[in-house]
Image (spheres, coloured by chain):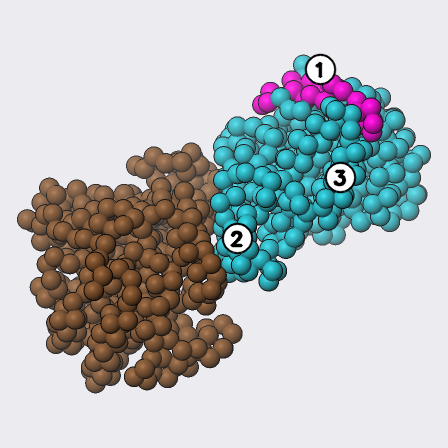
Chain colours: A brown, B cyan
Amino acid sequence: MVNKLIKFEVLHICKQSGARLGKLTTPSGVFETPIFMPVGTKGTVKTLNPMEISEVSEGLILSNTYHLWLEPGVDVIKAHNGVKNMMRWNGAMLTDSGGFQVFSLAGLRKIEEEGVYFKHHKSGEELFLSPELSIEIQEAIGADIIMSFDECPPAKASYEYQKNSLERTLRWAKRGKDHLKTNQALFGIVQGGLYEDLRRHSAEELIKIDFDGYSIGGLSVGEPKEEMHRITKFLNDILPFDKPRYLMGVGSPEDLVEGVIRGIDMFDCVLPTRNARHGMVLSTTGKYNIKKLEYKFDMSSLDPNIESPISKYTKSYVRHLFRESEILASRIITYQNLLYIKHLMVEIRKAIKEDRLLDFRKDFYKNTNY
Amino acid sequence: MVNKLIKFEVLHICKQSGARLGKLTTPSGVFETPIFMPVGTKGTVKTLNPMEISEVSEGLILSNTYHLWLEPGVDVIKAHNGVKNMMRWNGAMLTDSGGFQVFSLAGLRKIEEEGVYFKHHKSGEELFLSPELSIEIQEAIGADIIMSFDECPPAKASYEYQKNSLERTLRWAKRGKDHLKTNQALFGIVQGGLYEDLRRHSAEELIKIDFDGYSIGGLSVGEPKEEMHRITKFLNDILPFDKPRYLMGVGSPEDLVEGVIRGIDMFDCVLPTRNARHGMVLSTTGKYNIKKLEYKFDMSSLDPNIESPISKYTKSYVRHLFRESEILASRIITYQNLLYIKHLMVEIRKAIKEDRLLDFRKDFYKNTNY
């Protein structure tokens, strides 16, 4: 087994909430957790350049294996010596396994023991992805942290389906780990839908295989928020204390606060960036849509409490740009939304340190419309 | 009459070509001419922020009166104390009169002596624009240099039509000048289609009214290039030596070279920015479309001869971004194209100073596919 280049330690537990403050050391940077990772689907965080990404992130971003595998493809990625070098990103990177996209985007699938046969979500081309191939693609992409290939069944899948899927995903996790030839950190992904016994089984079996961290998959896929919180909290007591816990595909500002309180260390979500392109601003005073008439003459900046290169623009101007479909509007709002999430995570970590995260949550709901 | 804040002087005439090297002094900056002005239609040069605009321009940009009048509208612009302040642009600005858009974009028109009745190019709303109103809107926008309201007839308009239109445009020019209450510099616009006697008449009458500079309108609207060159050259001997000459809506790299040789001091065109969004790269080695398969593995930068913040990206990466419709592709190519045009104008001015602009043109055509 090659020596791993990442390290994780829990620095403090919030006495009020039980939330974890941690330190994640990677070859490309040292990060305090809980941390939010902006999503850079296809080799860029949409609308931003690498300098801007470093300004609005903590230096750790996610890339999507499925999308990068299809375009530009592994050959082009290899020609650049990896995606970080291709996009000129000096920070750290995490990749997903491609599993989620295969099961949410791709057309007609056939799931077999060896892997998944499916159709390209645009061209219809027949494709195949397996645990081994996912690892190989992720090795080519070259992220610091990579994921096991998993099936992500729909939230409403039956117990029977979840159980069978889960067993196969566990076998896939083992195969992926055995196949890995680099010292990239590899996380296992806990599945099992909304069934606590399946979640426990999944977590315990993954822990036996021994991963560098544990992701929680199959949540934030349409189930009620209470169910997501219940499963997250449930896993909090099962997952190993000294390994990072990553809640995949979460979330909104409120989901980040709630996730941290339930023991989560890492998050990613397209919400701040995708909603930006629809005019939805996330700010310290809450969320709002810049399109609204009430901002037509509003001479204040997008966020009254965050100073940044975009605070010079008025809401009135950004509204105008957005209404006229100017790309600069998407740039400005994307910047604001990620900067706000970064700001929120800093505040959350501060509240953990000071053992007052539940008080923070109370103020957060009182002072915003989240 | 208020004191004008702009000044223009010719510094040198190229002994080889007759091209003019000049100095244009404005309240917002001093510029060497010939100069190219990027187009910032709706309060931004598409895809770029003000810092980037200042990097890829010479500090003087154009804004479109017609578009800004419709959105965000004069009330919002006034609330920002002008468009420069609204978009946080510290450089200089020139506005067109809105005439060109009324005659190229807007629906059903009725041209009367007092002005033009027409329909909004999207909503169909009934609108009216006159020489006086155009001046008032341009006063609100607050550019350093503004334009007289003119009719811009189609290139194929008859002599009779051109003549009548021209006479009215001359009356409009006088009315506009009489209406102006600021010390913004006001240019007259020479019309007259491809008829030299009409062009002469237009220029001579405008000179009698006395403007701060003279624009050449009604070219680059579909006529053969030779016709554009013929009219430009013809006007070179008529327009006053000590006033700037602005060839509106031009141009491509080759049109810039040819225009300068025919005595032009100022240019604007959407070509570098619009074509960027279609994947067309302008570079010191010529133009090419980044979509082409031949760039799939091309590890060189977009332009081998210009160092800039975007030279770190490979053609291969930019091609990937463009194929995936990533906004960053449009940003990068827009930046490259404007930076190349800026570079070209620097080279042109250098060649004028050194009395070798015709040699420069020969090399320009030999070394590129322009």
Q: Which residue is mark 3?
A: B363
**Mark 3 surroundings within 10 Å by alpha-carbon count, few (fewer than 14), some (14 through 19), many (20 or more):** few
- Above or below, B67 against A160 in this view is above
Q: Residue under label 2, please give it.
A: B299
Question: For residue B278, which quarter of the picture?
Answer: bottom right
Q: In this view of the protein, can residue B86 be seen by the observer?
A: no
Kindly report which numbered mark, 1 or 3, lies closer to the viewer in this rendering. Answer: 3
Residue A264: horizontal and vertical position, in percent? 18, 57
Disc 1 residue crowd, few under 14, some 14–19, many 20+, Cα 10 Å: few
Q: Residue A369, which numbered label? A: none
Q: Which residues are magenta?
A: B5-29
For marks 2 and 1, the one nearer the N-term is 1
Q: Relative to A26, is B341 on the left or the right? A: right
Residue B351 figure quarter: top right
CA distance for labels 2 and 3: 27 Å
Amino acid at circle 1: Met
Q: Magenta span has B37?
A: no
**Residue B77, above or below A212:** above
Q: How many marks?
A: 3
The residue singled out by tag 1 in the image is B1
Q: First in sequence: mark 1 or mark 3?
A: 1
Q: Amino acid at mark 2?
A: Met
Describe residue B232's horizontal placement relative to residue B6 as left or right. right
Q: Amino acid at mark 3?
A: Asp
Instruction: Say whether disc 2 or disc 3 marks the residue closer to the N-terminus.
Output: 2
**Residue A212 shows in the view:** yes
Q: Chain of mark 2?
A: B
